[in-house]
Image: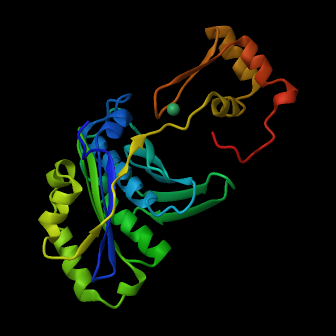
């Protein structure tokens, strides 16, 4: 692993009340891709959502997670990415097979919604924001969401390929609202960033390339890693969604029930005894807030 990969770096424009973040992910991105053979265009869009989820998670002020979910009626049926407050990230995409030869995000997703869920681990408290898939890019969807939820102008520049996912976030701090000159200049310079620069240059080089004439305060980089939150306990809970009869029939036909985690590929197996235990009255789930 190179020193620059899988890092999130925050920075502030000292004289302009604008904050920023740069993320570049390689190993974690490879881990997300390792169990799937996505069409190239899905890889690119999913990678952009992965980069964005890390950029947005940096504002979590508690132990918890942020999930971005895009779904609609198109051939790219679903993208889900979850990132924790300490930048453990996982994600998956689902799509119709055969997949059309189409690059337009709006056509691929169809009319649908982008749902952002923020969950606090300890209290299980949840905040959910929903926006229509209005715009031409993942960045535009999220900029619309952030303007609505935080009333702060944000610009996102995202890129991904089979090797890396990367992104740059620029956001007005509340004190900057009236200061359009700085905002316009800094976002204009930001918009000159190229995809291959986001995917290959480290944060310092990107900032020098864009803003060598600005006063920037750079904070220590934080590590980003792949983290799947699946567990046998969660899969067990999920099995309650099929009834005992159905479960018994699968056991009879196949000898066991096997559930693969879509995010990390781990297989959980349940035999006849496990299933009997799951459906015995003593261990019926009592906590409806537990997530699958
Ligand atoms: Zn998993």
Give whichever of 107, 43 is nearer the camera. 43
Residue at (40%, 70%) from the top-left corner? 144
Which corner quadrant of the image does residue 258 belong to? Answer: top right
Residue at (26%, 81%) from the top-left corner? 183
Residue 37 image position (x, y, % from top left): 32, 30
Q: Residue furthest bottom?
A: 178
Quadrant of the drawing holding the C terminus: top right
Residue 62 image position (x, y, % from top left): 57, 59
Q: Is residue 199 visible?
A: yes
Which corner quadrant of the image does residue 127 belong to? Answer: bottom right
Exactly how many numbered labels are in the figure? 0
Residue 134 image position (x, y, % from top left): 38, 66
Residue 259, relative to residue 292: is it above or below?
above
Residue at (47%, 50%) from the top-left corner? 86
Quadrant of the drawing holding the N terminus: top left
Residue 253, relative to residue 287: is it above or below?
above
Q: Is residue 192 visible?
A: no
Give whichever of 97, 90 is nearer the camera. 90
Give whichever of 63, 181 is nearer the camera. 63
Left or right of 248 in this view: 70: left
Left or right of 193 in this view: 148: right
Residue 192 image position (x, y, % from top left): 14, 66
Residue 15, relative to residue 198: is it above or below?
below
Q: How is the image coloured?
A: rainbow
Left or right of 284 in this view: 29: left
């Amino acid at each position: 692993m190179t020193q620059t990969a899988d890092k999130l770096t925050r920075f502030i424009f000292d004289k302009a009340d604008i904050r920023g973040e740069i993320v570049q992910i390689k190993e974690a991105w490879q881990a997300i891709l390792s169990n799937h053979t996505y069409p190239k265009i899905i890889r690119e869009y999913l990678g952009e959502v992965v980069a964005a989820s890390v950029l947005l998670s940096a504002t979590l002020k508690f132990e918890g997670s942020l999930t971005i979910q895009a779904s609609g009626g198109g051939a790219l049926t679903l993208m889900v990415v979850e990132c924790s407050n300490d930048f453990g990230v996982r994600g998956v995409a689902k799509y119709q097979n055969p997949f059309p030869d189409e690059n337009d995000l709006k056509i691929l997703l169809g009319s649908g919604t982008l749902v952002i869920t923020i969950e606090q681990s300890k209290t299980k408290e949840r905040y959910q924001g929903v926006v229509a898939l209005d715009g031409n890019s993942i960045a535009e969807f999220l900029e619309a969401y952030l303007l609505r939820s935080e009333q702060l102008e944000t610009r996102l520049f995202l890129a991904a390929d089979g090797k890396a996912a990367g992104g740059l976030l620029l956001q007005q701090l509340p004190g900057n609202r009236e200061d359009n000159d700085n905002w316009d200049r800094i976002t204009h310079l930001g918009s000159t960033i190229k995809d291959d620069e986001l995917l290959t240059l480290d944060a310092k080089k990107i900032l020098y390339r864009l803003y060598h004439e600005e006063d920037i305060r750079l904070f220590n980089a934080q590590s980003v890693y792949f983290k799947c939150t699946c567990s046998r306990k969660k899969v067990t809970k999920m099995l309650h969604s099929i009834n005992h009869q159905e479960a018994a029939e699968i056991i009879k036909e196949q000898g066991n029930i096997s559930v693969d985690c879509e995010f990390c590929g781990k297989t959980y197996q349940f035999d006849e005894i496990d299933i009997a235990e799951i459906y015995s009255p003593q261990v019926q789930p009592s906590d409806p807030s537990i997530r699958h």
